[in-house]
Amino acid sequence: MKTAIITDSNSGITQNEAKELGIYVVPMPVLIDGELYFEDLTLSQEQFYEKLKGDAGVSTSQPNPVDVGEIWAKALQQYDEIVYIPMSSGLSETCHTLEHYAQTEEQFKGKVFVVDNQRISITQRQSAMDALKLAKEGKSAQEIYNYLMGTKMQSSIYIMVDTLKYLKKGGRCTPAVYLIGTLLKIKPVLQIQGEKLDQFAKVTTLTKAKSVMINAIKNDFETRFKDLVAAGKMTLCIAHTENIAEAEKFKAELAEVFPNVEITFVNPLSLSVSCHIGPGALAIACAVKY
């Protein structure tokens, strides 16, 4: 049995990388002032941030199931089964929509396994890489699905937001909180623990934000993931929103703090998250690896 691995562009895997890796990536739709674009096909990272900073109306939406189905059907011409890894159902209904589509469309029944393993961005990318490795070992779609679901809560993401502007635009903070926070130069640190984007801490400088995020990962490594760290099964990843220089600097700092943990990726953060937090953000994540 040959198993295809398909994810979406929230994983940070580009179309060119997908071709090199031998996987498929569904481009996520982005609405800008009412016009529909597709991530990494008709919309680049640079274009996205240019529009976002220009105060355009930017939002993300679910991909059309029929469009996704066309990609599934294409893959099934070469493969027997598919493992599809979308963004976390805690952040979008996309997963549930496509789960239903796979179960009700006759051509996909029993062939497409939609994984709701609560991942986004760099942790979603790690899942795709693990799935690819399992597929190359000859594992079935069911076996890969079981592994990804069994490890779904073995990750953490902490994100420093550089400005409250986009949280306010998205209704995630009130005008009063935005005004006070801006005056105090607050840089909130948010977290994603499988489900929603939640507040974790409030700081006033980048240095303090990085310290908070490092300490949060240390705590995860010493508690929730202690056994996985000891077994060499945890990785670190870094994400950013139009902030590559700081991301690379942060990578070097993390390599000193966690010398025995592999740093796998330094990627732009998913546009689905980026439109809510804006440019200048910096994130650290840990995730189990196969």
Image (tube, rainbow, N blue to C red):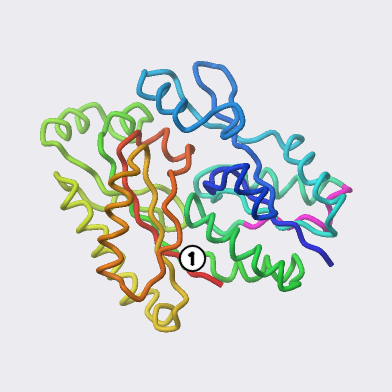
| Residue at screen point 44% across, 79% down | 232
Figure quadrant of residue 112: bottom right
Q: Give the overall secondary structure of the magenta segment.
A: loop
Image-quadrant location for residue 172: top left
215 magenta-colored: no
Give residue 204's position: percent from left, percent from top: 14, 44
Q: Which residue is situated farthest in the left direction here?
A: 184
Count of marks placed on residues: 1
The percent position of residue 41, horizontal first and vertical second, equals 61, 31
Left or right of 268, for residue 198: left
Which span is picked out in magenta? 106-115
Quarter holding the C terminus?
A: bottom right
Relative side of 274 to 88, left or right: left
**Quadrant housing the N terminus:** bottom right
Q: Amino acid at mark 1?
A: Met
Residue at 76% x, 56% y is: 82
Q: With respect to residue 82, does 233 lie above or below? A: below
- Residue at point 50%, 45% (across, down): 91
> Is the residue 19 above or below the residue 237 in the image?
above
Where is residue 285, by image quadrant? bottom left
Task: Where is residue 60? Give x, y as percent.
Answer: 52, 31
Disc 1, SS = loop
Q: Mark 1 sits on what residue?
A: 153
Q: Crowdedness of circle 1 by 10 Å Cα count: few (<14), some, many (20+)?
A: some
**Is residue 19 or residue 66 the one in the foreground?**
19
The residue closer to the viewer here, 261 or 281, is 261
Residue 225 in the image, given as x and y percentages of width and height: 40, 75
Seen at 38% across and 74% down, the residue is 224
